[in-house]
Image: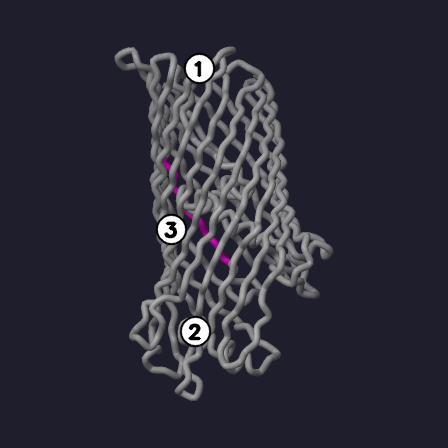
Amino acid sequence: MFRTLSKNNKYSILVLGVLLAILFSNFQNTSCFELSESLYSIFNFPQQNIITFYDTYNAKSEITANYSYHDIYRKRINSSPVLFSLDNVFFIYGFLPFKFNDINQAVQVKINSNKFRFSNENDRSSVIGTSDLSGIKSSIRWSMTRGVGMAGIGMDVNSNKGESDFNIVSFPTSDNKAMNIFFLDWLEPTFGRNLKCKYSGSSYKFIAWGSTPLKNSYRLSLSASRLRGKNKLQMNYTNSTNKSELNGKRRLDFPVQNRETIISLALHSSNKLLHFLEAGIIISNLKIDTDNNRPNDTDFETLGGGDLSRLGLFVNCTLERDWYKIWCGLSGASYSSEFDFNTPILGFYKNVFQISHGAEGRLANSSSFSQKLGGQVKLNIGRTVNEISLSYTHARYWFWMTGDAYLEFGLISTPIDYPVNIDANLWDVAYEVRYPTKMFDICYRIQQIVPLFKRLDESPIKMKRDIPGLKITNRGGQIHEFYISVFI
């Protein structure tokens, strides 16, 4: 479960961690929000899904139906529930090995259907509301071999959509009178208190791989994947400023493009203690633009945009025997980002001078270093097969943020030039019990993920503020799965 950090660690950056997960995970490659995969993406340990040489010679055809419940996050204030987010996943998997013209082949098909729900209507927050998202992800893989070399190709297609309805309870204010008069007081008439958002996204991921035999029962494989995704967030609001040309129903669009390339070289075997050794590279880029859908030339056509990039390296190693498995890994990455945004025309001071402000910033000299270590044991108890696993992943992030605000009417803003250093920890424990027969397997699995993020720097950029007199507790990170596999 998630635990509230002590007051000495009060600057928890769980929000920033989730943001990084969304940005750098296969966001367009997952339906809605897959908790485990997204969190591991923060630590730069991607998961490539391929059919291996040994899978191709599998004698069994398999069809699996799976349902999983993701209790992502829950928050209580003084023992009363105020926030929750959860994900329901329905999953169909099929694997068919066959032989045609002396060529061993295998086809793998996966179909995911997700329904994500978020609500913080009872929270003591400046913005409250609900979100409902749903998505479908289809995946297909095909491999072939004559017994020496092997080749395979695959594709993932993902589409998702959703709606959110938010209410702004309070707007920011300042002790600076001029800041209120020329900026903050205009936010409510510009955007109103009710925001209705729509989200849609799609992506395509292509993957190809091949392997060749080496000495001592090892094989060397090379895989490469390319993801291209498009998302759009549409925000609908009502403008009621002092300029009739700006008034009425308004819409602001945020189109996002995502690109990700993963290349990995791996050494693997089916009967050696060193089961798997992999080294790879990740190249990610996310670009965001804005479309203001202005009613006329009184307002800006666009409000700016930005981009965020990552270049990462990773190494994974797995040792395996019949009853146990041990894995470890290292990864590192560098990050860069630039953005330049401005507000729409907020109104006109004295009905003459237009009011608008802007800001630009960048992320430079930023990097991360991650380590992971885990193990799994298999126990036969009666007629059941029991698997227990425990994994720990740690990362240290060094971000350096710089930025400037461009304020009109003589308003003064202090430039941002501060470090944001983060210590990230991820505990992952799981238990699976399986009842196998000749024709089918029945399985239940429970997984508990505990992410802990801690700020190490002393910069004034804060992500969280303690409120005296409130006891806040957090829970979540739990996944329940039930599936049945039928062998043909």
Residue range of the region highlighted in magenta in the rendering? 111-119
Question: 135 above or below 232?
Answer: above
Q: Nearer the viewer, mark 3 or mark 2?
A: 3
Residue found at the very far right of the displayed protein: 8
Which amino acid type is shown beneath numbered disc 1?
Answer: Pro
Q: Is residue 479 at least partly visible in the picture?
A: no
Question: 158 above or below 185?
Answer: above
Q: Is tag 2's residue or tag 1's residue first in the polypeptide sequence?
A: 2
Q: CA distance from mark 1 to mark 3?
A: 39 Å
Which amino acid type is shown beneath numbered disc 3?
Answer: Gln
Q: Nearer the viewer, mark 2 or mark 1?
A: 1
Please tell me in which quadrant of the rendered image residue 460 appears: bottom right
Q: CA distance from mark 3 to mark 2?
A: 29 Å
Which amino acid type is shown beneath numbered disc 2?
Answer: Gly
| Quadrant occupied by the C terminus | top left
Q: Which mark is residue 192?
A: 2
Q: Mark 1 near mark 3, Cβ–Cβ under 8 Å? A: no
* Residue density around tag 1, few if under 14, some if 14–19, many if 20 or more, within 10 Å: some
Q: CA distance from mark 2 to mark 1?
A: 65 Å
Between 338 and 447, the one lying in front of the other is: 338
Secondary structure predominantly adopted by residues drawn in magenta = strand
* x and y percentages locating residue 316 in the rendered image: 55, 29
Q: Is tag 3's residue or tag 2's residue first in the polypeptide sequence?
A: 2
Q: Is residue 348 highlighted in magenta?
A: no
Question: 57 above or below 232?
Answer: above
Residue found at the very far bottom of the displayed protein: 350
Query: Label 3 belongs to which residue?
Result: 257
* Residue density around tag 3, few if under 14, some if 14–19, many if 20 or more, within 10 Å: some
Quick check: 178 left or right of 115?
A: right
* x and y percentages locating residue 367 in the rendered image: 58, 46
Query: Label 1 belongs to which residue?
Result: 213
